[in-house]
Image (tube, rainbow, N blue to C red):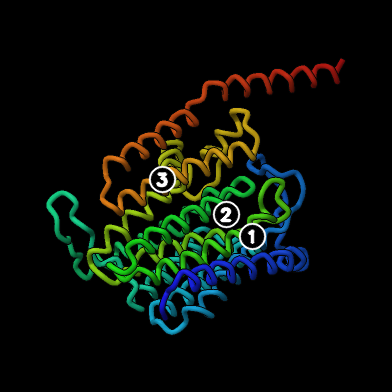
Amino acid sequence: MEFTRTVLFSIFIFAFVVSLAATPLAMKIAPKIGAMDIPKDGRRMHKKAIPRFGGMGIFLGTISSTIVFLWGSHQIKGVVIGGTLIYLLGVLDDLKDLPATVKFLWQTAVAVLMYYMGIKVEFIHNYFHGGIFEFGTVLCFIVTVLWIVGITNTINLIDGLDGLAAGVSIIAALSIAYVAYIHGNQYGFLIVCAVMLAVAGGAMGFLPYNFYPAKVFMGDGGSLFLGFMIAILSAVGPLKRSTIIAVVIPVLVLGIPIFDTFFAIIRRMANGQPIMKADKGHIHHHLMASGYGQIRAVLMLYGISADMGMAAVLVSRELYKDAFVLIVIAIAYLYVFLTDPNRNVQKKQAVDIAREEKRGKSD
């Protein structure tokens, strides 16, 4: 297929329309199958039960557009099969609350399947001395599995505020799509551009229902699917030199979720907690604790994600100094968000108000 601008635009619009139409249907199905998010702990930002089956819209929009426009490539078949398996895992987790071990083993099995279907991270670009550093068979297998499983879970971990995970995924997908488009003819990357546009369209059709105040959540089905699609398409690059785009770019555009995931692991290990245990130490929780509402907090994180997306585009064009400036700006904002002294002041004020209210009732 010739990937003209019209075809690429059609892929995005098709996914958007299907997702926009399918999400209300998912909202109606959710109560009937028990896919409801009931606030049971202090981590939840909502006060009433909300459907968490919206990932169906994202999945149907993305996969249907991919099949209609791109079916035929062996790699695309692998992406569709893997994406479907990961989505089913997320749905089961939403319904049954699967143990972390089961989810990890399922994700690993899908990653292994992708490896044997020819979707591999076989080499990295040697940025300091030029050329390519190729992995041996064993290292290639390990890196591929770790990459797919790791990136698959990043979107899931930031899915804590209305519209956050969907918006960050859209920014990431569009950034990768743009990089793939401008380098497509040289590196054979237009297939990645096409599928990333389908992913962005699927998430975009879901976002109007998920932005604050959310009427529906994507659930693990949606967040794991989005993470997997971004991870798997990073390994599809058909030419060796395209590795600079395939590996570095996703790391940059997923700066927020990767950063959040890394520090969540460090934080939980330092506190002696299981790595998979949920807590309120994520970046979006810090912003909420500092007094920002959900809309402001989400827009701030959108801004940082867009900043990293632009850095990714500059890196793909070998404008490293320009990209470095944007990355430093993003890091500076993350530092401000995570060290805001007002957060502790507001916590103390909240405690004092609660104490006074309690004292008033006792009097």
Q: In what element is the residue under mark 3?
A: helix
Placement of 80 over or under 52, stated as above or below: below
Question: Residue 207, how many percent across, how many down?
Answer: 63, 55
Amino acid type indicated by mark 1: Phe
Q: Quadrant of the C terminus?
A: top right
Question: Residue 19, how many percent across, how many down?
Answer: 64, 67
Tell me which residue sits at (59%, 28%) in the image: 290
Q: Marks 3 and 2: which is nearer the front?
A: 3
Tell me which residue sits at (46%, 60%) in the image: 152
Question: Residue 254, how many percent across, how many down?
Answer: 43, 50
The label on residue 206 is 1
- Could you classify mark 1 by the number of other residues whose Cα lies within 10 Å: few (under 14), some (14-19), or many (20 or more)? many
Taking 128 as reference, is 69 left or right?
right
Count up the numbered dots.
Answer: 3
Lower sequence index among marks 2 and 1: 2
Taking 325 as reference, is 104 left or right?
right
Placement of 309 over or under 271, stated as above or below: below
- Could you classify mark 3 by the number of other residues whose Cα lies within 10 Å: few (under 14), some (14-19), or many (20 or more)? many
Tell whether label 2 touches label 3 (CB within 8 Å). Answer: no
Tell whether label 1 touches label 2 (CB within 8 Å). Answer: yes
The label on residue 166 is 2
Placement of 233 over or under 171, stated as above or below: below
Q: In what element is the residue under mark 1?
A: helix
Separation (CA) of disc 2 from disc 1: 8 Å
